Every structure is written in structure tokens, then in C-alpha cells.
Image (cartoon, rainbow, N blue to C red):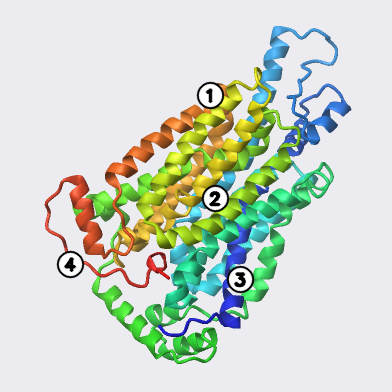
Amino acid sequence: MTEHKVTGTLAFTVFTAVLGSFQFGYDIGVINAPQEVIISHYRHVLGVPLDDRKAINNYAINSTKELPTVPSLRTPTPTSSAEEEAMASASHIIMLWSLSVSSFAVGGMFASFFGGWLGDRLGRIKAMLVANIFSIVGALLMGFSKLGPSHILIISGRGISGLYCGLISGLVPMYIGEVAPTTLRGAIGTLHQLAIVTGILISQIVGLDFILGNQKLWHILLGLSAVPAVLQSLMLFFCPESPRYLYIKLDEEVKASKSLKRLRGGADVTKDITEMRKEKEEASSEQKVSILQLFTNSSYRQPILVALMLHLAQQFSGINGIFYYSTSIFQTAGISQPVYATIGVGVVNTVFTVVSVFLVEKAGRRSLFLIGMSGMFLCAIFMSVGLMLLNKLAWMSYVSMTAIFLFVSFFEIGPGPIPWFIVAEFFSQGPRPAALAIAAFSNWTCNFIVALCFPYIADFCGPYVFFLFAGVVLAFTLFTFFKVPETKGKSFEEIAAEFRKKSGSAQAPKAAVEMEFLGATETA
């Protein structure tokens, strides 16, 4: 395509769409900064006593010491049964907090299957409007959580917000990939990830104690994601429907042409229509593949297993342990103002996402993934060593903090963005929808497991927790080295041949379709 310019309509449309990605990021990060304030509120609601009111206040403003619980106000020396009761109360609070964090991933896990289906059923615009209903309901439940049983309202509100994010994680990349010109699709496609990390960063900043992350305003902080949801809902009415959806799914060539002209600023769209006609013919000639067939058909089995392993590597690397619990990790490392260190992680995360936009287009997928995982392995070891030696050497807190920053940087260079689009490169038009659905589901499932289990694992392993993640990262790095093929600039036939070479299979290749219309394969 010769037309390269970004028109006002295209810029407005893409900005409107990635407001959904921004909400996604905000919902991921918002629970982190006010952790202690919410935990102390849970204690208050459930009647788990603390030493005194001063202790509650200290706890609410990021005290670096764990507050003792008082088993009985009458007895200065606790009995063994009272101690057991106190421990049970403390573990109950930890369980509620874990659920407050992880219920978000449960919602995402189930909804991730339905994003593509909803987009095809209603159209991309209406599907995003429907998704926003979940966002607003979830935000309202959390925003009014102080008025009722806060733990129940927060856990259910986070779950409903997760439903929204599960839908949006499929809808937004699909929509912006379809409205972007072919030559800009790779660059515009990365804005989804950039908006997510920006949302994480903004949630950390407004979560500061003197802004909204305090005892008076934390519920407003949680409910604030309704604002971009309402704004996006209003702006979507002025956005054109996806031309690809109109032409390929509805066979409405006139409407598709009109939508394209709006997006391209009145430029000639004949080439776009020809491209979509070819894509439609290819899609109709290739049968859709079910999720079961991905695992039973020998030509799909190896690619889907590799795709799932890459998503497992992304989630089990320990990155979400840092995103969800970085404030408490920095406290353990002896940082006096852990919330500011957490914001530092958000800044690093955003900067390196921008860096990865340029690197992914120039370097190979496999090599970037390997560099990222190797760097994370070393950082995880330094993190654990820093936490282990903290009592002996005070400056080790800086080693741990630096390791966390570098860990996040290496994650965003490769393991963060690559699993999402490499799955689309492994599969042609027929099996691609099923492969993307199962990949998204596995990603959210692992996200849930990490969110729920990390506080228990951290409690059990203490400073050795990141040694565990280092071992996991090393295993996935070796797997990537031996099993993952390079996909940059290759056709489906060439990728299939690479898979056969790595699995030692001599099976004859099936007819393959060249990789076209894939944003991830665009090169500048």
C-alpha cells in the first residue's frame, strides 16, 4: 500500500480503542500500592484486632514491619489456643487478599475465550461497548466497597473487571490491526501493549498515599477505572467499524469501502479492497480448526505445544509476582518508601516496552525471547542473593532493587510481548482463532495461579523465592533454545518445516498459505 500517513480519524480510532488496553493495565496495577490500607480495612471489617489505633495508621502508610495481632485483649500473655486463633485470623486475611488480587485473573481466564466470538457476532465497536458494561459494573462494586462487606465487593468487582479485560485482550488488538494500514500495522499493533503498561504506571502514581492510596480514598482509586470506560463508550460512537469485519464477515463491500475512506482520509482504497478480497478467498478455502483438533492433528500438535509453553514461560517467570506484590517485595528488601520504588518499576516497564517496539521489528523473535529469559534468570538469582544477605549487608537492598528493575526490562524486551503475536505466526487462517483462544486461556490461567499462590510461596520460601523462579526461567530458556523456531519473515510452510526439523519428523508438509496480513510480521 502506498498511503502511509496517519489520518486524524485513524489516530482518534486507535486512541479510542487502546483506552480499553489502558483500563486493562490500570486494573492490573491498581491493587498493588494500597495493599496495606486494604488489608487493614479487611482486619477492621472482620474484627481481627490490632495492637492499637496507631498501629493501624502505621500499617496504612507503608510501615516496613508486620503488625502483630492481639489474640485477646484481656490476657497480656497469649495462650496457645489464642495464638492458634490469631494465626487462623491472619491466614484468613492473607487468603482474602490473594483472592482480591487473583479473582481478576479468573474473570480474564473465562472471558478470553469469548472476545473473538463476541467481535464476530456483534461487530468490533458494539462488542467493545458491551465489554464496557462489565468494566463499569466492576468499578462501581469496588468504588462502593466501603459501604458493604468490602472484601466480598472487592473480590467480585475485581472478577467482573477481569471479565472485561479478558474480552478486551482479544478485541482491541483485533480491531486496531484491522483499521491500520498494512505498512503501519506492526507499529500500531504494539500500542496495545504500550497502553497496558501506561495504565499500570498511572495506577501506581494515583495509588500514592497522598493522592488516593490512603484510608479515606482507596475505594475511589479502585473505582476510577469507570472513567476511561465511560469516556471510551462515548468516543466509540464516532469510530468507524472495522472494514475487514464489514467485508469479510458481512460481505458489505460498499460499507467497508466507506469505512476505509474515513480511515484513510478519502484516499484511494482499491488496493485495500483487493487485499481483503484475497484474504476472504483464502479464509473461505481453509476450514476452521477446533481446539481439540489442535492437539489431535499431528501437523498442529507441535506448534500449539510450543505456543502454550511460551505463554507458560511468560507467566511462571515470576513477573506477575513483581507486578502484583512489588510494594511488599521492596518492603522486605528494606526500602523505606516502597511505593516510589514500585512506580520506578512502572516507569522502567513503560520505557522498555517502547524500546521493544523497535527491537522486535529488527531482531528475530526467538533471539529476543532467549536474551530476555537469560537476563531474567540472572536477575532472579541476584534478587534472591540480595534478599538473603540483607540482614548482614544493608546495601544489598540496592542489589535487590536494581535486579527487580533489570528483571522487568528483560521481560519487556522479549518474554512480555512476543508470546502474544508469535502464536499468530505459527498458524494460518484456519487454526489461528482456536490457537489464539487456547493461548489466551492458558495465559490467564497461569496468571491466576501466580496471583493466588505467590504470597504463600513467598511466605514459605522467604528470601529464596526468586531462586525458585530462576530455576523455572532456566528450564523455559533451554526449551526455547531447543524447540522454538525463528518465525520472522517466514511463510507458514517454512515454519512448519522448522517444527518438523526440531521434532525430528519427516512428515511431508501440507499446502501452506504465505504469512500475509499479520501485523507482527510487518517490517519497516
- Which one is in front in this view, the residue at disc 2 or the one at disc 1? 1
Number of the label disc, if any, that sits on residue 464: 1
Residue pictured at 56% horizontal, 68% vertical: 128
Residue pictured at 41% horizontal, 61% vertical: 362
In the rendered image, residue 189, in percent from the top left (x then y), is placed at 49, 66
How many marks the image carries: the answer is 4
Q: Nearer the N terminus, badge 1 or badge 4?
A: 1
Number of the label disc, if any, that sits on residue 15: 3
Q: Secondary structure at mark 4?
A: loop
Name the residue type under label 1: Tyr
Q: Secondary structure at mark 2?
A: helix
Mark 2, residue position = 107
- Which one is in front in this view, the residue at disc 1 or the one at disc 4? 1
Marks 2 and 3 in Cβ contact (< 8 Å): no
Q: CA distance from mark 2 to mark 1?
A: 31 Å
Q: CA distance from mark 4 to mark 3?
A: 39 Å
Q: Left or right: where does residue 448 sit relative to residue 34?
A: left
Q: Residues within 10 Å of mark 3 (few under 14, many from 20)?
A: some
Marks 3 and 1 in Cβ contact (< 8 Å): no
Specify whether residue 392 is in view: yes
Marks 1 and 4 in Cβ contact (< 8 Å): no
- Residue 152's quadrant in the figure? top right
Marks 2 and 1 in Cβ contact (< 8 Å): no
Q: Left or right: where does residue 148 sit relative to residue 22?
A: right
Number of the label disc, if any, that sits on residue 401: none
